[in-house]
Amino acid sequence: MSPARWRFGGRSLALDPPLVMGILNMTPDSFSDGGDLRGVEAAVKRAEAMVAAGAAILDVGGESTRPGAPEVPVDEEIRRVVPVIRALRERVGVPVSIDTRKAAVAREALAAGAEVVNDVSGLTFDPALASVVAEHRAGLVLMHMRGTPADMAGRAVYRDLMGEVESELAGSVDRALAAGVPKEAVVLDPGIGFAKTPEQSVRILGEIGRLRRMGFPLMVGPSRKSFLGAILGVPPEERVAGTVAACVVAWMGGAEIFRVHDVRPVVEALAVARAVRQAKEAGPPSPRTEMTLT
Ligand code: HH2
């Protein structure tokens, strides 16, 4: 069983109801929302709307990791994210996560007020990142991928998909714990679309529960991704319903944290799915305690 809370710094976040993490990409070239947010004001407005819609945490990124994306220089990545993190820290109440693979970027982001590091490389890219997380008592998301965004597409070859994702994530966990990151601060993510074919991403959504035995909360990030395009034949901005379906299925399998662009539909869908589960667990009502759901 995974723990029911995610603890880092002075925070202790309950995972039921599930947490929705709103995506704030401060990038000109992200696959679905690149260039949307020009400047700090636009980012804060988007963040406030996400929090009003139910986002419990915000993930700020300054480097696209879409397949084939080029690496962004450290100074440029810092320039994109730090002013936004500072403004969110002052004006928005929820914790902020920095989506980066780089220790130098994480250090500046944490100093500016971020509380979580979301590393899509699972500590394979920058060996110095884990100790930066430990020093700041930050939360840490370890995502599974292989190689880099530039070459990951060619590495989507598995004999045992879930077994290999699990053992490679276990390597990431070892690196985090060895650097002094507390176990309770760590969240795992199987990395939908990262060194995965569309078929493999779909399988992972259905089998994500197998990772629960690792004993960490599970995050998943299916938002608007290309496996949805492969199923639906629609462009990223028309993949909201597909994203909702993917999140609900993953939640039913045991995922508890959802990284998405479209916060409100995902929050609402998860609330309905959870109400159904609770009603089922409660059993049939006795005549005197008829449910009054409208
Ligand atoms: N996906 C993306 C980026 N960061 N982090 C986690 N933990 N899980 C994910 O699935 C994940 C992630 C890629 O999506 P996006 O940020 O929308 O696009 P881009 O990388 O083009 O900015």
Image (tube, rainbow, N blue to C red):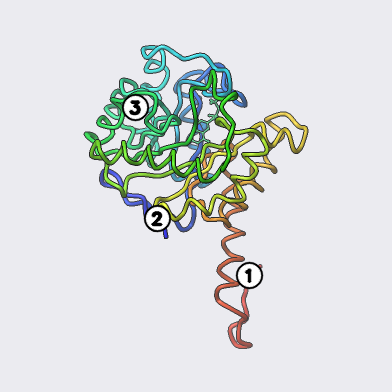
Q: Is the residue 135 above or below the residue 5 in the image?
A: above
Q: Is mark 2 on a helix, strand or loop?
A: strand
Disc 3: CA contacts within 10 A as few (<14), some (14-19) or many (>=20): some
Amino acid residing under circle 1: Leu
Closer to the chain start, of discs 1 and 3, is 3
Closer to the chain start, of discs 3 and 2, is 2
Amino acid residing under circle 2: Ala
Where's the N terminus, which quadrant? bottom left
Where's the C terminus, which quadrant? bottom right
Q: Can you tell which mark lies on residue 14?
A: 2
Q: Can you tell which mark lies on residue 293?
A: 1
**Horizontal placement of 93 versus 154: left or right?**
left
Q: Is the residue 238 above or below the residue 162 in the image?
A: above
Residue most toward the right? 233
**In contact (CB < 8 Å): disc 3 and disc 2:** no
- Between 107 and 2, the one nearer to me in the picture: 2
Q: Tell me which residue sits at (45%, 34%) in the image.
A: 59
Q: Is the residue 167 above or below the residue 101 in the image?
A: below
**Horizontal placement of 130 versus 101: left or right?**
left
Query: Picture coordinates of residue 2 (x, y %)?
Result: 41, 56
Q: CA separation, marks 1 and 3?
A: 42 Å
Residue to which mark 3 is pinned: 86
Q: Tell me which residue sits at (62%, 76%) in the image.
A: 291
Amino acid residing under circle 3: Arg
Q: CA separation, marks 3 and 2?
A: 25 Å
Q: CA separation, marks 2 and 1?
A: 24 Å
Q: Tell me which residue sits at (59%, 45%) in the image.
A: 204
Q: How many labels does the image show?
A: 3
